């Protein structure tokens, strides 16, 4: 292993080389007397250099978290020396916090003491934004006993931290009009094995003895049975749309659409619904209907990959919608509703008898207001046109909720569910 001189080693080597020439130039032997101990110090330091490169093990615990929730970066370092200097290449969105077993130098530097050739340290990291944040590498330097030379290693780290968007806890969800045959948290209109009470009636020879209500039968001369509604779940397809102008102020609108879609996926995933996802941001991706925590994490990763686009490939979108959307599926659009082509597809699905809901992200909060008369008039016309599109969707039986800054998703979904109940009663 080729030794690497430290700052101290370079200083002593410079003194050992330059001091004799300074003595000759000045005609004074005293500077040369300084060069001899400096050279001896360098020679002894090179002799006592570390024989092996330091190694390290870098792990993240846990490897998946929610933005704003701290995680721990654990380091186990092995090397010949008393201390190790570690510089970690951290993602800009990861803020380092407290340190255990070491002292911090700068943003991502650590000084780890080594006992019997090994040391351990724990660095707290707080992710500030959702996404995939890799821990790229770490540079470890272990100085020799005299601090003249050091052994250096560049450790590539393969771990990456998956940061999920911070989601809102939703108490009220949009219940699909129709359920499927899988068990879940929804109450089916059909009778079967479940927890929701349907009615009590007199016993018949075709009834199972398990359905007899013995408490009610004890108060009567006849046997009574309890009928219940079957527990079912729903098929939910989330379409996340980020068709926006390519402007910097619109990025926050995409981030809000991602957070809403992630909240919907996590809320319905907790209810054991079968979920599907069609992402129109960046490139089109379709994830078929499935359930379980692994499928939920796969959908959340796809939601986080959403980017603003200006022109989607509508033929690919139509192909997915035609093949994937079947009754009794419920389709939830998370969209800023800036493209009339997407509105037309929502209307087409609703006209075909598909249960459709739209969570519209109001982008007017991120449009810069203008003091000029013509832009102000254009903004008012645009708002009126947007309102016309929303009313057109509602007229087709689509539940529409418009999210604005300061409004909770729970409040929005509760308002949409109440509108769906009134609409269902009106149609009945």
Image (cartoon, rainbow, N blue to C red):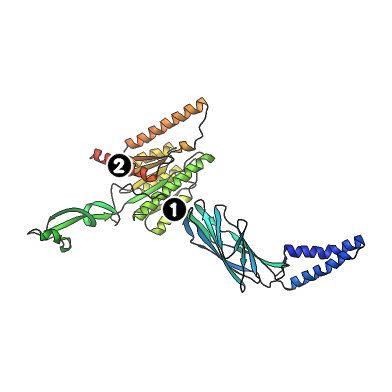
* Residue positioned 74% across, 64% down in the render: 8
Residue 246 seen in the current view: no
Q: Judge by depth and name the residue closer to the eye, 223 or 424.
A: 223
Instruction: Name the residue carrying label 2.
Output: 418
Labels 2, 1: front one = 2
- Ranked by sequence position, the earlier of labels 2 and 1 is 1
Residue 321 percent coordinates (x, y): 38, 46
Instruction: Name the residue carrying label 1.
Output: 300
* Residue positioned 86% across, 64% down in the render: 31
- Horizontal side of 383 relative to 201 (left or right) equals right
Quarter of the picture containing the C terminus is top left
Quarter of the picture containing the N terminus is bottom right
Q: Judge by depth and name the residue closer to the eye, 275 or 288.
A: 275
**Mark 2 to mark 1 CA distance (whole Å):** 28 Å
In the orientation shown, which residue stands out farthest toward the right? Answer: 27
Residue 302 percent coordinates (x, y): 46, 52
Residue 79 seen in the current view: yes
SS of the residue under disc 2? helix
Pointer 1: residues within 10 angstroms few (<14), some, or many (20+)? Answer: many
Residue 16 in which image quadrant: bottom right
Residue 17 percent coordinates (x, y): 83, 64
In the orientation shown, which residue stands out farthest toward the front? Answer: 30
């Amino acid at each position: 292993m080729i030794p690497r001189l430290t700052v101290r080693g370079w200083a002593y080597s410079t003194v050992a080389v330059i001091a004799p020439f300074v003595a000759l130039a000045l005609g004074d032997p005293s500077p040369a007397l300084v060069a001899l101990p400096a050279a001896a110090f360098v020679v002894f330091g090179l002799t006592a250099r570390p024989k092996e490169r330091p190694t390290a093990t870098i792990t993240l615990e846990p490897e998946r978290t929610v933005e704003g929730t701290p995680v721990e970066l654990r380091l186990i370092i092995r090397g010949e020396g008393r201390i190790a200097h570690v510089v970690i290449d951290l993602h800009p969105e990861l803020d380092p916090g407290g340190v255990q077993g070491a002292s911090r130098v700068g943003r991502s530097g650590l000084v780890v003491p080594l006992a019997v050739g090994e040391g351990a340290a724990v660095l707290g990291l707080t992710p500030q934004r959702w996404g995939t944040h890799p821990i790229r590498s770490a540079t470890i330097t272990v100085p020799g006993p005299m601090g003249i030379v050091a052994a250096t290693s560049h450790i590539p780290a393969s771990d990456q931290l998956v940061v999920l968007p911070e989601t809102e806890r939703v108490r009220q969800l949009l219940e699909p009009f129709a359920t499927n045959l899988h068990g879940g948290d929804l109450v089916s209109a059909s009778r079967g094995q479940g927890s929701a009470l349907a009615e009590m009636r007199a016993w018949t020879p075709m009834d199972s003895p398990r359905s007899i209500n013995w408490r009610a039968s004890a108060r009567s001369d006849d046997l009574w049975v309890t009928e219940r509604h079957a527990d079912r779940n729903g098929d939910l397809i989330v379409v996340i749309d980020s068709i926006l102008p390519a402007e910097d102020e619109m990025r926050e609108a995409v981030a809000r659409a991602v957070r809403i879609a992630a909240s919907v996926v996590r809320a319905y995933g907790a209810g054991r619904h079968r979920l599907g996802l069609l992402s129109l941001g960046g490139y089109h991706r379709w994830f078929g209907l499935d359930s379980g925590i692994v499928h939920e994490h796969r959908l959340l990763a796809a939601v986080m990959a959403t980017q603003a686009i200006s022109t989607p490939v509508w033929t690919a979108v139509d192909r997915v919608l035609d093949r994937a959307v079947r009754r009794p599926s419920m389709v939830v659009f998370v969209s800023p509703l800036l493209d009339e082509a997407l509105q037309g597809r929502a209307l087409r699905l609703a006209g075909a008898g598909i249960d459709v809901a739209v969570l519209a992200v109001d982008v007017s909060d991120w449009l810069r207001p203008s003091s000029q008369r013509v832009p102000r008039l254009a903004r008012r016309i645009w708002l009126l046109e947007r309102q016309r599109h929303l009313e057109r969707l509602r007229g087709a039986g689509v539940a529409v909720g418009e999210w604005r800054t300061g409004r909770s998703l729970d409040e929005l979904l509760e308002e949409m569910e109440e509108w769906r109940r009134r609409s269902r009663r009106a149609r009945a």
